[in-house]
Amino acid sequence: MSIFEDAVSIVREAEHLVIGTRFKARWRHVESALDTIVHAPWFVLVGVQERLATFVLALFLVPVWWCLIAALMWATGGGSAVSLHTSQGWVVAGLMATGSVLFRLPSRSTRLGIRPPQVAALAAHIKSIAPDEATMKLLQAGVATLDANATQRITRIQWLLGLCWAGLAWATSHWVFAAGISDMTRREATTDIFGGLLVFLFFGVGAVSYEGTVRIVKQTIDFAFLEASDSRRGEQPVASGGSEFLD
């Protein structure tokens, strides 16, 4: 196959490993339809799963931080303040839990979703289609070109969501909070804007999840190339030298 086809096969294999399963079809048009109807939602759901795991971690940390705050106040002699200001304590605990998730160590945050077995499987696929180091570098350059396209798509989606958010903000300020608007018009506008907000949230969550899955695929490919290259160097025969000892 050509470099282009091999590069595409690497990206597709990475997608297959990240998604976990893939329906295959003999006909190209059927396979394209399956990618659009079945595999694309699964691809986004992988990102949703990662975001949900982060959200669950934040929820778990809320009571942990509350207990730490309560213990700190009790140790400093402010134990009565905990019982009198329970709601404030939970708010502070929620803020600390959110900060703990947002500012996680890079060794934790940058490896989310990356699975060593998936990296090893993709590295084996790369080695099967790249007979030498030169071909592997060409394939890596081809995959980088495809990744640039995916990055541009994410940027366009973000700009579109930003324009939609600006439109919702403009409509809210002119049809809901503006003075001189009749109650009937305000109620109708509120209903429409709320519906638009739900649509915006749907696509916003999808965009964030899609971006997360793309990151997982990219990092899986990057580490697979590194592992394949390292394995290829390890397989190179070592030139035998002469006799080390002379009689």
Image: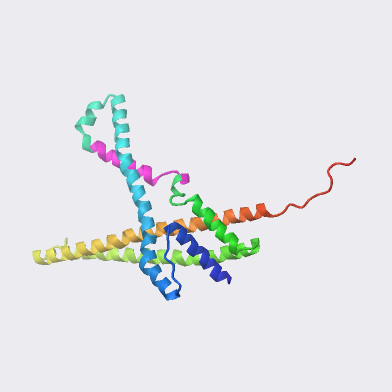
Looking at the rendering, in which quadrant would you find the N terminus?
A: bottom right
- The question of residue 128 being in magenta is answered with no
Q: Is residue 169 visible?
A: no
Q: Within the image, what quadrant is residue 130 found in?
A: bottom right
186, above or below 108, in the image: below
Q: Is residue 104 visible?
A: yes
Q: Position of residue 13 (x, y in %)?
A: 49, 62
Q: Position of residue 72 (x, y in %)?
A: 32, 29
Q: Nearer the viewer, residue 56 or 247?
A: 247
Q: Within the image, what quadrant is residue 125 found in?
A: bottom right
Toward the right, the furthest residue is 247
Q: Residue at x 33, y 48 (%)?
A: 55
15, above or below 242, in the image: below
Q: Nearer the viewer, residue 99 or 109?
A: 109
Q: Residue at x 25, y 26 (%)?
A: 79
Q: Is residue 226 left or right of residue 54?
A: right
Q: Residue at x 42, y 65 (%)?
A: 23
- The question of residue 99 being in magenta is answered with yes
Q: Is residue 128 left or right of residue 94?
A: right
Q: Residue at x 33, y 44 (%)?
A: 58
The region drawn magenta spans 88-107
141, above or below 233, in the image: below
- Overall secondary structure of the magenta stretch? helix
Q: Is residue 188 left or right of residue 131?
A: left
Q: Position of residue 236 (x, y in %)?
A: 69, 55
Q: How many marks?
A: 0
Q: Position of residue 153 (x, y in %)?
A: 42, 66
Toward the left, the furthest residue is 183
